[in-house]
Amino acid sequence: MQFTETVMDHFTNPRNVGVLEDADAFVEVGSSECGDTTALYLKIEEGRIVDVRFRTLGCAAAIASSSMATEMIKGKSLEEAWALTNREVADALGGLPEPKMHCSVLAEDAIREAINSYREKQGLEPW
Amino acid sequence: MSEKIYYFDHAATTPTHPEVVAAMLPYFTEHFGNPSSLYGLADESREAVTHARGQVADALGASPGEIFFTAGGTESDNWALKGVALANREKGDHIITTAIEHHAILHTCEFLERQGFSVTYLPVDRYGMVDPAAVEEAITDRTILVSVMTANNEVGTIQPIAEIGAVAHKHGVLFHTDAVQAVGNVPIDVDAMQIDLLSLSGHKFYGPKGTGALYIRDGVAIETFVHGGGQEKGRRAGTENLPGLVGLGAAIKRACDDIHGHTARVAQLRDRFLDEILESVPEVTLNGHPTERLPGNINISFAGIDGEALLTLLGMQGVCASTGSACSSGEETPSHVLTAMGVPPSLARASLRLSLGDLTTEADVDFLLDTLPDAVARLRRLSRGHA
């Protein structure tokens, strides 16, 4: 499988790996398609994601997508983070081989589920 | 990317041995005559075909007249199953095989099912072993063929072929074995093992790709697979792949003349690697049989990681290996072999197959023993937050 240099960089040197003990939102999502799992932790202040951590069990594309997605939402408002698509994550990675596109969906799913779980905790309607 | 290659994928393919290439070369340029032609140039070609056929026959304990050249293991498997099914349709319509066969067998069986044949796919135990008693229980008065691989390509488990052959023959049923992974690694004697048909492939034992053979015991009813000219006694038409079959003959002779020396060296490397890796890495399990396995086969699962991610990490350092999971089509495709053995999907996806052979050195094993534990720990930190 040929990956871009950016994918290989984020795979071998992933950003934001780990856990946040005082996370305001935490979700664990799995892909029914290939069994990949991602755990995502968000620290949220005044509607902004001020810190983020992840753990992912998956192939190089899944790990790189998680790493890139967390970089892209750090410091962003919840609205901006919600709007992030897997296509944008893949583009930021310089592209993913077509059979690996579905690996980037997991990050998008995790972010949206985390935001909704946070909104529900705040007594707000989920998006 | 690393320049040096650490090749641990001999079960996928092997390089053609230089001696084999040397034997082949004159048949591209000098002795290029069509063996079917009638002049002197063709005599040399005919002699080469006869010589190669003898070499293959000797390696199997067969007669030269029972060796038919093909374009590889897949063609041999297709021919054996479809040819026997079609030629014996009057007798019956039932075939027995196993859940862990290569796709060349499984997909051919599925094709035959669509043509009205019925197929029993026997289960295996947790070591990937077929029970000869289960073969016997599955035989009905409609059964025409039993096909069980000699050794499995993923986990290396070697089947009790002689016992299964005896069971088939006791009930008057033909016995085919896909010996693609076994030839050159496991001594074969078609009489002692009661084999009626056997598939082999040249590139698995340092011969050229695109070469293979089907052993067909004298008297076995089988349809012609490729129709055309009179080559291979009219049973497999097409101008002979002359350089290819010369290479196949040279390779099988080389592989089988010193089969015990070769397998002892490879098995020693395998055992050293396994002993150390099982010691140095936590939560690692061996897939396949502890003793009845191919000398070069290692199949291990590392809980908490993805096999493909591991291959990507190892690949950056020049390591060539395989995994039992390929998440490439957007579907989970855990290995059908590991699944049949009852390995849970989380461990099937976490599997690594290393197949050792002629290219493997002590230094290669040392390198892998150095790099593999780190790679596994790194991926576990990513999935669990700790190693």
Image (cartoon, rainbow, N blue to C red):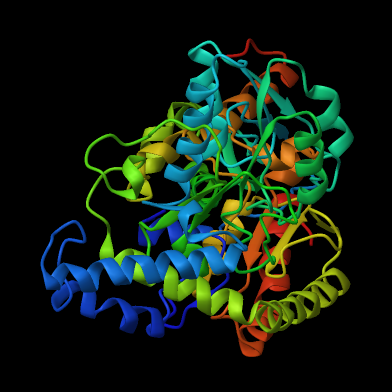
Residue B101 is at least partly visible in this image: yes
Image spot of residue B135 (x, y percent): 80, 31
Which one is in front, B197 or B1? Answer: B197
Horizontally, residue B234 falls left or right of residue B197, namely left
Against A14, residue B30 (above or below) is below
Residue B160 placed where, x, y %?
81, 50
Which image quadrant: the N terminus of chain B?
Answer: bottom left
**On the image, which quarter does residue B170 sit in?**
top right
Quarter in which the C terminus of chain B is drawn: bottom right
B216 lies above or below B55: above
> Which residue does the image show at 71% across and 79% down from the upper left?
B260
Mark count = 0
Choose between B8 and B15: the one closer to the eye.
B15
Residue A78 seen in this snapshot: no
B127 vs A58, left or right, is: right
Q: Residue at x 68, y 25 (%)?
A: A118
- Residue A100 higher or lower than B189, as above or below: above
Residue B375 spot, x, y in % from top left: 66, 68
Q: Position of residue B101 (x, y in %)?
A: 63, 40
> In the figure, residue B37 lies in which quadrant?
bottom left
Give the farthest residue toward the left: B39
Depth check: give the residue in front, B211 or B290: B211
* Front position in the image: B220 or B236: B220
Q: Residue at image x 78%, y 23%?
A: B139
Q: Report the residue at 60% width, 74% height from top.
A: B256
